[in-house]
Image (cartoon, rainbow, N blue to C red):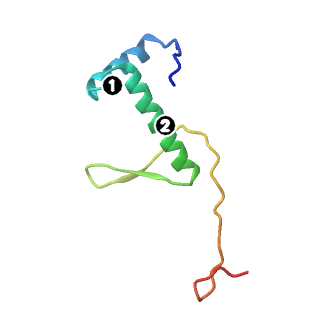
Amino acid sequence: MSKRINIVLPERSNSRLEDLKSRTDASSVTEVVKHALMTYESLADHIGEGVTFTGHKPNGETFAVEFMIDVAVKEPHLHVVSSEGREAG
């Protein structure tokens, strides 16, 4: 089921959407927004799991990639395993 929504964007944002549509061969701005939402959701899921992202410059230098996504990072769940490979306790 689809739901139509209307959003008001500044002209610069509209231009950016049209540019992305062209650069990615998307069939519509709606397709660009849907892919952007899926990407944002995936990043939020990974960040919530504590995943970090690293970029690599052509000269070999690495750097931390930061995303402006504010999600709570899940606490790790630890299991104690006995030497026989079974959970202890």
Q: Amino acid at mark 1?
A: Leu
Dot 1, crowdedness within 10 Å: few (<14), some or many (≥20)? some
Residue 3 vertical position relative to residue 89 in the rendered view, above or below? above
- The residue drawn where x is 51% and y is 49% is 46
Left-right relation of 29 to 45:
left
- The residue drawn where x is 59% and y is 89% is 84
Residue found at the far right of this picture: 89
Left-right relation of 15 to 3:
left
Residue found at the far bottom of this picture: 84
- The residue drawn where x is 51% and y is 39% is 41
Q: Percent from the top left, x then y, of residue 5? A: 53, 16
Q: Percent from the top left, x then y, of residue 34? A: 44, 29
The residues bearing labels 1 and 2 have C-alpha atoms spaced at a distance of 15 Å
> Which residue is under mark 1?
20
Please tell me whether mark 2 sits on a helix, a strand or a loop. Answer: helix
Q: How many marks?
A: 2
> Which residue is under mark 2?
40
Q: Quadrant of residue 22?
A: top left
Dot 2, crowdedness within 10 Å: few (<14), some or many (≥20)? some
